[in-house]
Image (spheres, grey):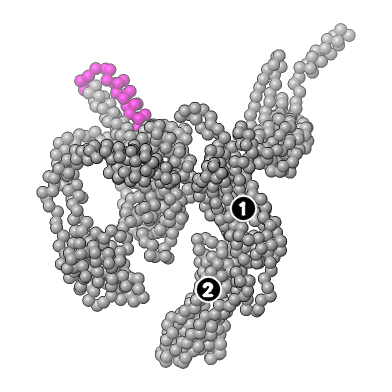
């Protein structure tokens, strides 16, 4: 019995000391903020969950996000407790009490029961301010009218207003499940600052259009959007970072009434909106066997997804109808505004006069609430006798033939816009053709490469100096471009005389105009005749009438209906060119001071005018005359683009005028020139925050985390100098090893050389890594697009058929070529296109 008593006592002690297992919610209750992200932890005590069996019950009005995990071990009074937690971000979507029901969950200790938890949902406050979310952020969805016709297109407007001191960024695009409506994509947000009730607010307005196909009364669901609010800061000084809370903003639901269309005739096409119809015959006089083109074009705004095609047409059986092709073109990816056209080829088989009956198109006009019919004018086609070339005779000569095409319908697009905070890369466009084959060059071996790097070039200094001075004098020669243009014009005229093909002549005429503009220094991309006359008259008054006449005739041949040139045009153009004399390059200009001593003169130019100009600009800025300060600092930047202080000041003047995007572009240049300066880092963070631009490269540098913290210790130019210094260090170490090998220096040389080699390798690796982090920002011709623009395949606005792509503000690319007010951009992904030069800012030049 004594032994049994001892065993029972020990068992009770062990049972008492054994840890109990439990699973619970932490906190087990309390209050949550409506539409506010909070955290709930599912705590496993002295047990671990089975990840494959973790399944929470569905809770109406509470959204669970992807959890994070944590674990903890504690020992209190020799008792060890282990906890494992799943931390769920949760967001209440209803203003009522929310209960998580009890459920069982699988653990390594078997099934355990989780008790129910109840939470009250109240109004969320913004940080610790005590302000309700509705006092800081408001969203409103409005429409032009609440009663509309079935198939009518109506605009919707979304207004978002945020108190400026709390605004950080938009976390998502608008999410609107519009129910029975077919909705276009929302326009891009363009936040602006304004003063509302004495308080500065960031206001964003976006628009879209929609139509309802079925009649009835509907209640549209609210539109929602996630907004990041800045509720404080953590850290201090350069290490401070904003504390951001993410909230979902919701509009009020809208009620609309869709009326059915009145009874319609059999001719009704189903189109609702505003339309126009154009019918053309080319030519109206033909011969048997010669084709006639009948073009029918329907354009306007309306329910294009429900329009199947153009109306049916009828022609005489004496025409053969070549199967036409319809082309539907929607404006700017719109669903409700576009053009539908068909080109029908009619081949007459008998001579005579034929009257083509009008084409009728009936649609419902929503403005007047009535049906309207568009009708084309009747056309008479005269067909003369001719040789019929291999035509198949119609099966019923003289009888009418009806034909029609069904238009391609557009698939409804989602009403939810894709989420994208960084600027969207442009779509791929066709590249320039390659004129000939291209060969690559293999890199040199290590030894020849370092030999070329370390060989001194002191004996070549004088010859290189004179060569550079000669090249500089030729580049600075004001007549160089005119001589090149005159030489190219002569070759172009020779090609014109020997080219009978119209397409080739059109291309050569474009070349003639481009080089003529360079010869007479015409400062415009598409000059008129008067501007040409004025520019020629400034240099050679007697030649102005002849050149302006040649330009006018070339314009008519390129852009007018008649593409033929006068027969003597080439002869007159050659005579006018022969009369032009452009001075040649004077060799004596080689010894001009500005060519022989460019660095000395540049230093004098930089040092003399800058102080007075800076003082004048600073005085204007202090007086509040920001446009005058901007003009003065812009001149300084144009003269010395490497002056980052002037760029910093120019950005300040632009920011004072609420031109944040352009200021952000200049401040980006400031950061790239002086990334260690506190002003540069402040400018970059402020510019990105206030302009709404978010290039991924700049955002990473603004945060300064990870490898970007190392990269921004020096500018790209300084890292290039560091790489050159590493090569010189390595060359020095090799020379020291050679001297030691020949016994010229002591044994200390080997460890010293190895240490220098290690330092050179580390420096070269750091420089390489940092230059790769900068990417295209390390290119000397890098530019930033500071306002939304359009990327084009060719540098002209006259050709409307070319491929284009929207170009987002904040895009980074290399501007490697310029042409008459256009710049060619090369993006990191290999995309190439042309954009207006005024839409971008070069960051180093």
Q: Is 539 situated above or below 167?
A: below
Mark 1 or mark 2, which has the lower sequence index?
A: 1
Residue underneath mark 2: 276
> Which quarter shows the N terminus?
top right
Q: Main secondary structure of the magenta part?
A: helix
In depth, the one of 627 and 568 nearer the eye is 627
Q: Position of residue 737 (x, y in %)?
A: 26, 24
Please check the rendered image and state whether residue 761 is part of the magenta-colored stretch, yes or no.
Answer: yes
Q: Position of residue 642 (x, y in %)?
A: 31, 40
Q: Position of residue 242 (x, y in %)?
A: 53, 34
In depth, the one of 187 and 389 nearer the eye is 187
Q: Position of residue 271 (x, y in %)?
A: 60, 71
Q: Is 230 situated above or below 345?
A: above
In depth, the one of 103 and 582 nearer the eye is 582
SS at circle 1? strand
Q: Within 10 angstroms of label 2, few (less than 14), some, or many (20 or more) residues?
A: some
State the mark number for residue 646.
none
> Which quarter shows the C terminus?
top left
Q: Which residues are magenta?
A: 741-769
Q: Is residue 476 left or right of residue 161?
A: left
């Amino acid at each position: 019995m004594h032994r049994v008593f001892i065993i029972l006592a020990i068992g009770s002690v062990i049972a008492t000391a054994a840890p109990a297992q439990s699973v619970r919610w932490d906190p087990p209750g309390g209050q949550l903020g409506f539409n506010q992200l909070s955290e709930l932890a599912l705590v496993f005590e002295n047990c671990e969950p089975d990840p494959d069996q973790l399944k929470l019950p569905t809770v109406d009005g509470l959204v669970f996000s992807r959890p994070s995990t944590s674990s903890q071990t504690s020992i209190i009074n020799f008792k060890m407790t282990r906890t494992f937690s799943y931390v769920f971000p949760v967001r209440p979507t209803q203003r009522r009490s929310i209960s998580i029901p009890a459920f069982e969950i699988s653990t390594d200790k078997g099934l355990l029961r989780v008790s129910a938890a109840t939470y009250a949902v109240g109004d969320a406050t913004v940080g610790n301010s005590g302000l309700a979310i509705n006092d800081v952020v408001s969203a409103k969805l409005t429409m032009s009218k609440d009663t509309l016709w079935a198939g009518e297109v109506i605009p919707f407007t979304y207004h978002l207003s945020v108190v400026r001191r709390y605004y950080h960024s938009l976390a998502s695009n608008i999410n609107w499940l519009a129910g029975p409506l077919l909705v276009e994509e929302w326009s891009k947000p363009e936040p602006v600052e304004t003063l509302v009730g004495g308080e500065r607010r960031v206001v964003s307005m976006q628009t879209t259009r929609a139509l309802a196909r079925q009649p009835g009364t509907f209640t549209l669901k609210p539109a929602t959007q996630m907004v990041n609010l800045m509720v404080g800061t953590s850290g201090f000084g350069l290490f401070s970072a904003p504390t951001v809370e993410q909230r979902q903003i919701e509009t009020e639901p809208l009620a609309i009434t869709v009326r059915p269309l009145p009874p319609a005739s059999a001719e009704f096409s189903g189109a609702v909106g505003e339309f126009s119809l154009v019918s053309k015959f080319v030519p109206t006089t033909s011969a048997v066997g010669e084709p006639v083109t009948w073009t029918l074009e329907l354009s306007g705004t309306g329910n294009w997804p429900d329009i199947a095609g153009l109306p049916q047409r009828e022609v005489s059986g004496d025409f053969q109808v070549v199967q036409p092709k319809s082309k539907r073109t929607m404006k700017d990816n719109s669903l409700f505004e576009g053009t539908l056209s068909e080109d029908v080829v009619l081949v007459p088989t008998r001579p005579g006069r034929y009257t083509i009956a009008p084409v009728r198109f009936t649609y419902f006009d929503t403005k007047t609430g009535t049906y309207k019919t568009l009708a084309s004018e009747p056309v008479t086609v005269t067909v003369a006798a001719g040789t019929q070339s291999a035509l198949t005779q119609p099966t019923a000569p003289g009888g009418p033939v009806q034909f029609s095409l069904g238009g391609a319908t557009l698939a409804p697009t989602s009403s939810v816009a894709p989420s994208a905070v960084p600027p969207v890369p442009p779509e791929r466009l066709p590249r320039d053709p390659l004129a000939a084959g291209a060969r690559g060059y293999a890199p040199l071996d290590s030894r020849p490469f370092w030999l070329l790097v370390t060989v001194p070039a002191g004996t070549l200094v004088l010859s290189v100096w004179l060569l550079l001075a000669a090249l500089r004098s030729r580049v600075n020669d004001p007549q160089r471009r005119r001589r090149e243009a005159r030489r190219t014009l002569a070759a172009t005229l020779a090609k014109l005389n020997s080219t009978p093909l119209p397409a080739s002549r059109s291309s050569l005429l474009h070349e003639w105009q481009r080089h003529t503009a360079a010869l007479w220094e015409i400062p415009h991309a598409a000059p008129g005749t008067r501007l040409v006359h004025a520019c020629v008259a400034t240099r050679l008054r007697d030649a102005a009438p002849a050149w302006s006449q040649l330009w006018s005739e070339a314009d008519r041949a390129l852009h007018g209906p008649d593409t033929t040139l006068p027969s003597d045009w080439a002869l007159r153009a050659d005579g006018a060119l022969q009369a032009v004399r452009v001075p040649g390059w004077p060799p004596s200009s080689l010894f001009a001071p500005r060519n022989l001593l460019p660095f000395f003169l540049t230093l004098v130019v930089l040092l003399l005018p800058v102080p007075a100009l800076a003082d004048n600009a600073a005085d204007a800025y202090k007086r509040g005359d920001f446009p005058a300060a901007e003009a003065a600092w812009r001149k300084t930047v144009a003269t010395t683009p490497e002056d980052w202080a002037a760029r910093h000041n120019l950005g300040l003047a632009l920011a004072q005028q609420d031109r944040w995007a352009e200021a952000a572009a200049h401040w980006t240049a400031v950061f790239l020139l002086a990334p260690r300066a506190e002003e540069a880092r402040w400018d970059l963070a402020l510019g990105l925050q206030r302009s709404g631009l978010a290039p991924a490269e700049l955002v990473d540098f603004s945060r300064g985390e990870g490898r970007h913290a190392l990269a921004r210790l020096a500018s790209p130019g300084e890292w290039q100098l560091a790489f050159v210094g590493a090569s010189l260090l390595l060359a020095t170490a090799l020379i020291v090893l050679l001297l030691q090998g020949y016994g010229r220096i002591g044994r200390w040389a080997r460890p010293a050389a190895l240490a220098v080699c290690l330092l050179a390798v580390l420096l070269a690796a750091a420089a390489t890594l940092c230059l790769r982090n900068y990417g295209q920002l390390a290119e000397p011709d890098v530019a930033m697009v500071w306002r939304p623009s359009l990327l084009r395949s060719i540098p002209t606005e006259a050709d409307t058929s070319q491929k284009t792509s929207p170009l987002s503000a904040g895009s980074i690319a290399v501007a490697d070529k310029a042409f008459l007010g256009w710049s060619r951009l090369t993006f990191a992904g290999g995309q190439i296109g042309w954009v207006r030069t005024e839409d971008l800012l070069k960051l180093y030049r």
